[in-house]
């Protein structure tokens, strides 16, 4: 049954954390701040959150060891520390990696008996409580602040996979000014991820008149700044950062309703084996996804929203933005076979997919 459901309170704008610090009070008494090694210190987001908690008189512990594409091992370690420290709410600060990690940690810390065998428990859903999560995004890519997904690296299986639980943050504090410390490549990788979310959501088995409004609006915004994104970083403007942050949140809301599709499924082994950043790896497959999509009228609709004349213009733009794709044939073959047995992704694609068509994606 189709459903519209967006339970996250989104507070956005410059200074969002400081201006809304009272939202943390309702979440719990002691926070665990979940973040990466460097960037949240550089862009000011960590300071903003600790200042807010201090001003509220709330205590906290910081776990700042979340790596890109966080592993089950790392979230288990953080959860054990959270239990020891008696943290009862979680604030993910950073890109998708720390935000996703904060959801998994909130689940494990609330159910400490799961920690010893976290991989099994994260991927076998049970009806269990979860501690509250707040999210502060510092990339304009994943939309994890408004999605229920948490994607973990599974070293045991040499890939990445979303955990079996749907955990929406209760609050998202969205301040585009944190994006300004990002490199040009960092912006490109993450903005292409948001683009993929909207395309894979609009062209999706679960797409409908209601949930498509997120992608429609987001694609228009994204398209309005596409030339600037491809240009020199010195030309990046305040308005551009704000536009891509809005597009990324809307893209997150879109996939929260529909899930992602084939390009995301194909990207995980590429990221795991070659270390290609998430959004870039997904972007490799977008031109093929559009070209071979079963309903070309709908493809025209998304191209129009983005402001591209046709498929070729889209592919040309994206290929020059992302540069050369180098995926060894052996990996590409294994990747295709893996996708064709990935029911979770295939069911979001409204048409039949064959190995032959898939092999033309790159
Ligand atoms: P990320 O892995 O969170 O971060 C990538 C890099 O960017 C890190 O080195 C990080 O540094 C740095 N960084 C973050 N914010 C920055 C800023 N404002 N300025 C400068 N550098 C900054 O990147 P991401 O693309 O946002 O997230 C990718 C992860 O999210 C993947 O695991 C992906 O599978 C997942 N994902 C989740 C969803 C979802 O719905 N939940 C959707 C799509 C993707 P530090 O390490 O120092 O912080
Ligand atoms: Zn993504």
Image: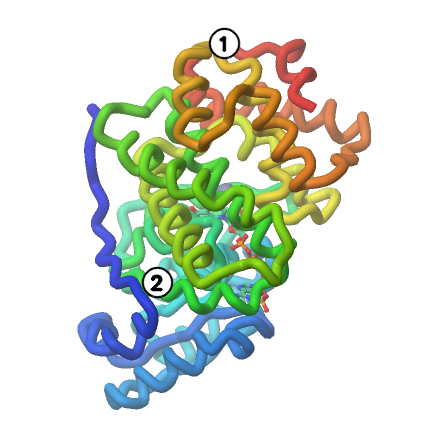
Q: Earlier in the sequence, mark 2 or mark 1?
A: 2
Mark 1, other Cα within 10 Å: few <14 / some 14–19 / many ≥20: few
Give the residue displayed 44% in from the left and 63% down from the top.
238
Q: Is residue 123 visible?
A: no
40 and 235: which is toward the camera: 235
Mark carried by residue 305 = none
For the residues labelled 2 and 1, the Cα–Cα distance comes to: 38 Å
* Picture coordinates of residue 218, whole percent (x, y): 36, 40
The quadrant the N terminus occupies is top left
The residue identified by callout 2 is 174
**Quarter-wise, where is residue 82 in the image?**
bottom left
Question: Is disc 2 in contact with disc 1, using a CB cutoff of under 8 Å?
Answer: no
Helix, strand or loop under label 1: loop
Give the residue displayed 41% in from the left and 35% down from the top.
198
* Picture coordinates of residue 172, whole percent (x, y): 31, 61
Mark carried by residue 352 = 1
Task: Relative to 25, say whether 353 is above or below.
Answer: above
Q: How many marks?
A: 2
Q: Is residue 89 left or right of residue 95?
A: left
* Picture coordinates of residue 46, whole percent (x, y): 45, 77
Colouring style: rainbow
Q: Is residue 312 left or right of residue 293?
A: right
135 and 101: which is toward the camera: 135
């Amino acid at each position: 049954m189709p459903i519209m459901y967006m339970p996250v309170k989104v507070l956005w704008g410059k200074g969002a954390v400081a201006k809304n610090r009272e939202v943390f009070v309702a979440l719990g008494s002691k926070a665990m701040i979940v973040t990466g090694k460097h960037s949240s210190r550089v862009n000011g987001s960590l300071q903003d959150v600790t200042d807010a908690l201090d001003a509220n008189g709330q205590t906290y512990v910081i776990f700042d060891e979340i790596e890109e594409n966080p592993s089950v091992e790392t979230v288990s370690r953080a959860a054990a520390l959270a239990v020891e420290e008696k943290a009862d709410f979680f604030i993910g600060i950073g890109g998708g990696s720390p935000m996703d990690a904060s959801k998994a940690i909130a689940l494990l810390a609330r159910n400490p008996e799961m920690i010893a065998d976290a991989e099994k428990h994260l991927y076998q859903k049970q009806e269990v409580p979860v501690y509250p999560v707040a999210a502060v995004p510092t990339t304009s890519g994943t939309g994890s602040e408004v999605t229920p997904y948490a994607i973990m690296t599974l070293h045991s299986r040499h890939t990445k996979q979303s955990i079996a639980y749907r955990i929406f943050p209760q609050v998202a504090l969205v301040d585009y000014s944190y994006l300004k410390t990002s490199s040009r490549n960092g912006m490109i990788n993450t903005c292409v991820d948001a683009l993929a979310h909207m395309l894979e959501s609009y062209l999706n088995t679960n797409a409908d008149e209601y949930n498509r409004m997120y992608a429609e609006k987001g694609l228009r915004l994204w398209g309005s700044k596409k030339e600037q994104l491809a240009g020199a970083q010195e030309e990046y403007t305040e308005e551009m950062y704000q536009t891509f942050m809005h597009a990324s949140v809307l893209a997150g809301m879109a996939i929260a309703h529909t899930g992602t599709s084939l390009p995301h499924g194909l990207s995980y082994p590429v990221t795991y084996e070659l270390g290609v950043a998430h959004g870039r790896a997904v972007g490799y497959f977008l031109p093929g996804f559009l070209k071979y999509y079963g309903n070309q009228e709908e493809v025209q609709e998304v191209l129009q929203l983005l402001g591209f004349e046709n498929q070729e213009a889209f592919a040309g733009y994206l290929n020059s933005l992302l540069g050369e794709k180098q995926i060894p044939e052996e990996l590409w073959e294994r990747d295709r076979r893996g996708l064709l047995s990935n029911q979770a992704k295939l069911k979001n694609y409204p048409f039949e997919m064959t190995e032959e068509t898939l092999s033309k994606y790159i």
